[in-house]
Amino acid sequence: MLTFLNSAILFGLAAISIPILIHLFAKQKSQTVLFSSLRFLKELQREKIRRLKLRQLLLLILRTLLILLLVLAFARPTLRSRSAASLKAGAPLSAVIILDNTMSMGLESAGKRLLEQAKQRALEVLSLLRPGDELYLLYPQAPPRLAHEGPRYNPASLQELIERTELSHARTDYMAALQLADELVRQSSNLNREIYLIGDMQQSGWRFPADDGHTLLSEGTRLFLLPIRGSQPENLAVTEVALANQILERGKVIEIRAKIKNVGATAVKNKLVHLFVDGKRVAQSVVDELEPGAVREVVFRVVPDRTGFQAGYVLLEDDDLLEDNRRYFTFRIPDEVPVLLVGNRVSDTRNLALALHPDAEMAAYIRTKQIDAAAFDDEDLEAFQVLVLSNVPRLSTGATLKLQRFLASGRGLIVFLGADVDLKNYNDGFHKKLSLPPLTPANTGSDGEQFLTFGKIDFSHPIFSGVFEKSKTVDSPHFRVAMKAISKKPLDKIISYSNGEPFLFESRYQRGRILYFTSGFLSEWSDLALRGVFAPLVNRCVSYLAGANQVRNSQAHVGEELRFMSSGEDLRGDLRMEKPGEVESKVKPEVFRGNYRVRFADTREMGIYRLRRGETILAQWAVNGEPAESEEEVLDVAEVQKRLSGQEVYAIEGEGQIAQKLQQTRLGRELWKPLAAAALLVLLVEMALFREKSSGQVTEVS
């Protein structure tokens, strides 16, 4: 739409008549001069008069056009959107400032963090807004967060919030922030709606839908992109910390592996990497040389001298982004492993108890209780970390439900078969509920003299870590009776029979793990209990199930919800979540699928979170930032405009362009400069024609 910012000047268009009037009144009259011979002079006269009249007409047009262009230039014609008229008239505006304060904005460039530069740009935008405008300040985190409740109508109140904005460790999500911002301005009754996105435009923060041209903004909403760019940074990041061990024991070596990535633009050399456990530096290493984009794994080995929950972090030397130089981890070494042994006969559990207590030290570490299968339904499983079923004939619906709850809380189950097992009862109930494959008798040979032995063994499994490492040979038992697992999906086989069928496989149910032996260890089925492999195998299985839950499920990212589930008394009483900095928040458990569950969503800070009941630690988590926040890849604003084609998206780049660009997009594009240039060009042409006219006057002859 074309409008004029100085429309009063348009009355000057009446001046267009001036050159026309001058032309009419000042038209030169011809003079009569007598000659003896006129034929050639008259021919010459007619030719010159035609040229003169054409030149005069051109001069008239040029002078009229010159006045028209000058008047239009002073009237300041402008091309602008429909809503610009209301802005000019002083109509209120609804505006959302999206200020990126996510972790990547902590990058230091030219001695100043990107966040500080972004805050300065936000204040410049704020200075162009007026009292009475409906204003919001939004942070593009995942999920996006408003800095205040309800709209603000005074720019000064928003200025204080901008100045107080601190760096967040959350992941960037520009799309979610833009959707929320559009909802806020769309709900307003104001016709004028603007969104300002100020940030580094990190590529990982843009999650466009598959189809290009996605309609993100409602009609009439203008989006202004103000990118904040940094210089080429030097930046290493700890992107991952993991414990290589699945079995954790006091006094035994724990291997901690940290991945270091060069996410900067320059190569780095000789950077120190430190390992801290429980606040003490216990090891360090050096990254000798790392090119941009390269990843190096650093391995630390420590020997914990105590049991219980422990926490630590890997720390890098300072660089341009400090927030990704530290990554937390946590683990737990149990004081003891309570194990419940359930069997149909005394012999079903006696050999297991002996295998788990080879010496006094193991007897103190692994505490066992033996019960008869008939008493299982009445047994409280809350006190046990590992449950072993050995030759249990049948499992009722209630018993299966107890097993489901037991595994859902993150604990472990070991199953040994035997002569008393009702295979149909297992397949129809227990196996279906726990997503285990059905079993059928395996063919062990054509007569009683034939048997199965061990076949392939996965020595890379944590059960065999530190066992049989040198020879990797096992004195194989003989299996006279074995079961075959029928599964369409590949099974996680740990030990196979000589016929390729699984003897020991691992399965998972929710947070828990199951180790399933498809044969028994008593003499009716095999001689496993008499072999040297039996005791270490049973010990390692119990230690693996007890330790696996202490390693996994303890990592989370900033903004993610922490969950802890228990089926017993753990979650009754005074429950508190201890956040980094020893700040505590009260939490209340909820009932979920027959269990008690705690949920905690306020994980905006990196560090260690502990769920406490009194002085007892029930669970512990390491909360870290998203590794993607360290990446320096950014999305060009032209690409954003392309992906949001068909919508009003404007880019404001460079210093000192905010006011000019806003005026142009709000009030439209002013045309006075090209009009003034055209007027100057017309004036030059007119002057050239006028000189030519003055140099030759025509006199009429007769």
Image: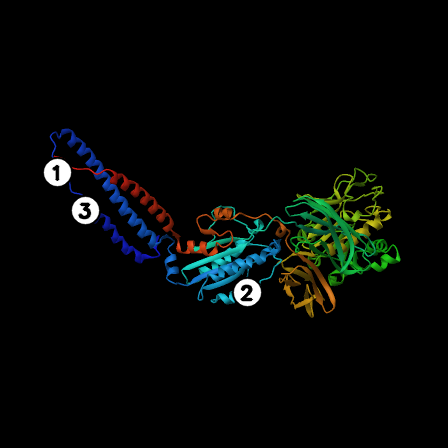
Question: Taking 437 as reference, is 161 above or below it?
Answer: below
Q: Residue at x 50, y 62 (%)?
A: 136
* Separation of marks 3 and 2 at Cα, in angstroms: 69 Å
How many numbered marks appear?
3
- Please, what is the three-letter code of the amino acid marked with disc 1? Thr
Q: Which residue is mark 2?
A: 161
Disc on the earlier residue, 3 or 2: 3
Image location of residue 44, percent across then percent down:
18, 32
Choose top left, top right, bottom left or bottom right for residue 292.
top right
Q: Which residue is mark 3?
A: 24
Q: Nearer the viewer, residue 193 or 266?
A: 266
Q: Nearer the viewer, residue 51 or 83?
A: 51
Nearer to us: label 3 or label 1: 1
Q: Please tell me whether mark 2 sits on a helix, a strand or a loop.
A: helix
Disc on the earlier residue, 2 or 1: 1
The C terminus sits in image quarter: top left
Disc on the earlier residue, 3 or 1: 3
Q: Which residue is mark 1?
A: 32
